[in-house]
Image (cartoon, rainbow, N blue to C red):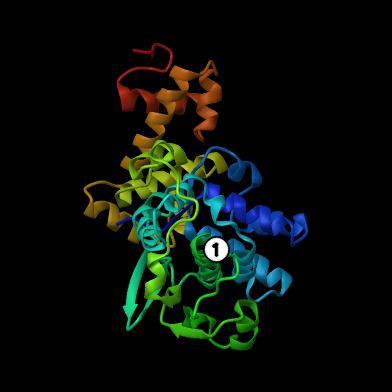
Amino acid sequence: MVVPFVNSLTLKSVVEIIDGMIPQQDVDWAMRKVAINRRLIAGPPVFLPLQTEACFLESLARKTGERHLGAIIGQHYDYEELSWYSTYVLSARTLGEAMLRAAKALPVLNPGCRVALERRDQNVVVLFYSGIPTVVGARHIDEGLPCMMIDLCRRFLGRNWMPAWIETPSASHGFESSLAQVYDVPLLYRPYGSGIGLDRQLLDAPNPNSTGAEKKVLLRDLPGLLGVSPPSSFAESVNAVLRVQLMLGDTSIETVAHCMSLGTQSLQRRLRAEGTSFRDVRNAFLKARAVDLLRETNHSITEIAGALGYTETNSFRRAFRTWTGRTPTDFSPT
């Protein structure tokens, strides 16, 4: 099982939009509420739990009083900001092929999320499922995604195209009039997920900007181009969270479980189902990180110990000997 993640490249674009709408001190305050910072977002791509983005948006929405912050951000989002993912999708020959590419490649960009196409008579609904329907703030993501889908369709159907309707989760129910003003199209409600409805024949619309074969991006290229490979198991999901939390200075099981919307016992239970434990996953992560730092940098052992969260160098030395059978001092590249 893979928990829902968001690539920091995507969150970086969201923050850039928000910075143009909301005072920076309020944005930074909301970041601190979810234990992230601008340095993390601007750095090398990492996967962040999608609930982090949801809670970040909810904090800002409460701070500003904007009920539909996600939808407003979505209206300002340029689909091409999705980096190589959008390059892959937008090189499709038709809109229908682009939708299929979006669904196929989404696990590379947002592991744990999915896109699906649902036929309804002469129409088709393009649906997005975040995988976090019960998380506070998830509705901001659900309300923003239809706008991004519309922008994708407009690349094939023209800049003024609008869907026949938009579907949003029932969590948005109660804000019908204000949300309708944001979208300016009919709204339908569903238990979870969000999407747009369009005439099925529009899926045959050709790509007006089709590229040659030499400029095509293949699905297998995306992990390398996006700078980070998606996790394929729950243990790898924990490892992805550890990578981020190491930068933020807290790799405890309590913090990692909180980031994944789990209790510590639930986290351990899911890891046991894969034949491992949090201690084993964390130790393997720290071992690999320590080896890389020793091989690729000239930092002192004390500096490396501190970077890995050890307050005492001797504790790190003992742990390293347990992991490798060698000491950091006599470790040498092979």
Residue 237: % across, % down:
37, 49
* Dot 1 amino acid type: Asp
Q: Residue 80 or 269: which is nearer the viewer?
A: 80
Classify residue 182 by image quadrant. bottom right
Would residue 234 appear left or right of 91 to someone viewing this image?
A: left
Residue under the point 74% across and 62% down: 21
Residue under the point 43% across and 65% down: 130
Would residue 323 appear left or right of 37 to someone viewing this image?
A: left
Would residue 186 appear left or right of 257 to someone viewing this image?
A: right
Q: Is residue 11 above or below residue 327?
A: below
Q: Is residue 72 above or below residue 280?
A: below
Residue 248: % across, % down:
56, 43
Instruction: Say which element carries label 1.
Output: helix
Residue 17: % across, % down:
67, 57
Q: Is residue 294 above or below residue 62?
A: above
Residue under the point 35% across and 47% down: 231
Q: Residue 74 or 230: which is nearer the viewer?
A: 74
Q: Residue 272 or 230: which is nearer the viewer?
A: 230
Residue 315: % across, % down:
45, 28
How many marks overall?
1
Which quadrant of the figure contains the N terminus? bottom left
**Residue 29 in view:** no
Residue at image mark 1: 151
Characterize the local packing of mark 1: few (<14), some (14-19) or many (20 or more) Cα atoms within 10 angstroms. Answer: many
